[in-house]
Amino acid sequence: MEKKTYTAIVLAAGKGQRMNSAVEKQFLLLRNKPIVLYSLLRFQESAVIDDIILVTDAAWIDYCRETMVEAQQLTKVTKIIAGGRQRYDSVYAALRAMGDTDYVMIHDAARPLLAQESLLLLRDTVEEHAACALGVPAKDTIKRIDDAGFIVETPVRESLWNIQTPQVFATNLIQEAYELLQTMDKTDITDDTMVVERTLGTRTKLVFGGYQNIKITTPEDMKTAEMLFDSVW
Ligand code: CTP
Ligand code: MG
């Protein structure tokens, strides 16, 4: 079978409000490297990935080009573009900047502990199902609460997963979904599987990522990432 082409979109345009740090969290240092660099290195070294689009704040574009893409010879990074206000705006900007490719892997720069094997699993899955993502079974019991903080419902834990990235889609599917999204209410959209679900009704296949593939969100996550680091790098 002919090899399909894959573009990785690395999302690094967020403000990191919950981290509450002086610089945006994706540029904090983890073992001496900016967090975003780990995602770029992972995709650069992967035989699955053909090219990479990095999305960041306009103010960080030169820094990323000079200190990461050029200094580390990240030859697959073909574009560094400015993101938007919300995560879905940043994804849309990347989808519009993208060249011809069969599949798109959308990844949070805030997840530096992605395992190399996960990319192979995602490739095999997306070529069968057109939409897939990494996730892990929820460890905690999850409650739905009301505005006053009282529990109103307890979904069965066995049916609950924490969703991660990469989230991977056939290119025409994700581009069509994001075009449709521009005409719709975007309230509460936090990931790409929600976009294909809401716009086209497409079902996304979840596959096991790994409990180490955390999203660095609040300050204590830096310590957790430090502890988990050696399991993937
Ligand atoms: N992201 C982005 N553009 C945005 C918002 C988020 O590229 N407008 C990226 C972030 O940089 C991060 C990923 O999407 O790598 C996941 O988002 P999240 O963890 O929510 O990061 P932030 O939005 O930066 O953090 P917070 O929500 O705490 O402000
Ligand atoms: Mg956010």
Image (tube, grey):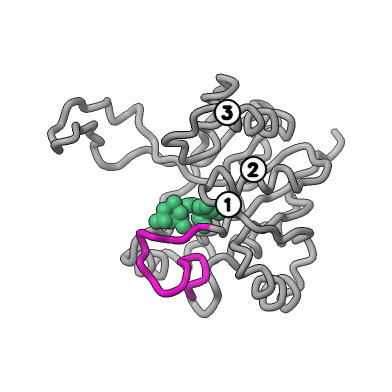
Which residues are drawn in magenta? 14-30
Q: Badge 1 local density, few (<14 within 10 Å), some, or many (20+)?
A: some
Amino acid at the residue labelled 1: Gly
Q: Is residue 18 magenta?
A: yes
Q: Are marks 1 and 2 in contact (CB under 8 Å)?
A: yes
**Label 3 to label 2: alpha-carbon separation:** 13 Å
**Label 1 to label 3: alpha-carbon separation:** 19 Å
Which residue carries the number 2 mark? 92
Q: Badge 3 local density, few (<14 within 10 Å), some, or many (20+)?
A: many
Q: Quadrant of the N terminus?
A: top right
Q: Which residue is pictured at 68% across the width and 50% down the height? A: 8
Which residue carries the number 3 mark? 196
In x, y percent, where is residue 172?
Answer: 74, 30
Nearer the observer, 43 or 176? 176
Helix, strand or loop under label 2: helix
Q: In terms of sequence position, does the residue under pointer 1 or pointer 3 come before the other? A: 1
Please indicate, yes or no, whether residue 181 appears anywhere in the rendered image: yes
Amino acid at the residue labelled 2: Tyr
Q: Are marks 1 and 3 in contact (CB under 8 Å)?
A: no
Q: In terms of sequence position, does the residue under pointer 3 or pointer 2 come before the other? A: 2
Select label 3 or label 2 by which is in front: 2
Helix, strand or loop under label 3: helix
Select label 1 or label 2 by which is in front: 1
In x, y percent, where is residue 95?
Answer: 70, 43
Q: In the displayed orientation, state which residue is furthest to the right.
A: 2
Q: Which corner quadrant of the image does residue 21 belong to?
A: bottom left
Q: In the displayed orientation, state which residue is furthest to the top.
A: 201
Amino acid at the residue labelled 3: Val
Nearer the observer, 60 or 78? 60
Q: Is residue 84 left or right of residue 164?
A: right
Which residue carries the number 1 mark? 84
Q: Which residue is pictured at 56% across the width and 58% down the height? A: 13
